Image (cartoon, helix red, strand yellow):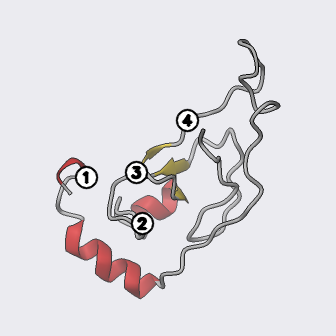
Amino acid sequence: MLKLKPNCEYCDKDLSPEALDAMICTYECTFCSDCVEAVLCNVCPNCGGGFVSRPIRPKTARRSNTSLLHQPPSTERVNTKFSREEITTFSDQVKMIPPEER
């Protein structure tokens, strides 16, 4: 079950469960699309993988127990431990390699 983290781990922008600009890597690291493009260069600073749009969890349970009401989003804010310089150095090493080949 996705945690649906409430914020961008870099800029701390609020990312509601229905945010269309929330991006995640395979480990559910969560960043806004602006940071993924402008700062991270589609390289997760934690694992080196790429990003995809985070799915939207239904607000209404159209099947039993399958909605935000039944699986609410996380309220725990997470922030990256890496500085912008560390992120730039890291992403520069792998950003030219397609995510599926990293």
The number of callouts visible is: 4
CB atoms of marks 3 and 4 within 8 Å: no
Label 2 sits on a secondary structure element that is helix
Label 4 sits on a secondary structure element that is loop
CB atoms of marks 4 and 1 within 8 Å: no
Question: In this rendering, which labeled residue sits more in front, label 1 or label 2?
Answer: 1
For the residues marked 1 and 2, what is the alpha-carbon distance in whole angstroms? Answer: 17 Å
Label 1 sits on a secondary structure element that is helix
Give x and y (percent) for residue 34: 50, 59
Q: Residue at x 22, y 68 (%)?
A: 94
Residue type highlighted by circle 3: Phe
Question: In this rendering, which labeled residue sits more in front, label 2 or label 3?
Answer: 3
Foreground of the two, 96 or 61: 61
Picture layout, residue 26 above or below residue 29: above
Quarter of the picture holding the C terminus: bottom left
Quarter of the picture holding the N terminus: top right
Q: Is residue 47 left or right of residue 11?
A: left
Question: In this rendering, which labeled residue sits more in front, label 2 or label 4?
Answer: 4
- The residue tagged 4 is 55
Give x and y (percent) for residue 5: 66, 54
- The residue tagged 3 is 51
Label 3 sits on a secondary structure element that is loop
Q: Is residue 18 left or right of residue 2?
A: right
Earlier sequence position, callout 2 versus callout 3: 2
Give x and y (percent) for residue 43: 34, 63
For the residues marked 3 and 4, what is the alpha-carbon distance in whole angstroms? Answer: 12 Å
- The residue tagged 2 is 38
- The residue tagged 1 is 99
Earlier sequence position, callout 2 versus callout 4: 2
Q: Is residue 7 left or right of residue 28?
A: right
Q: Is residue 37 left or right of residue 30?
A: left
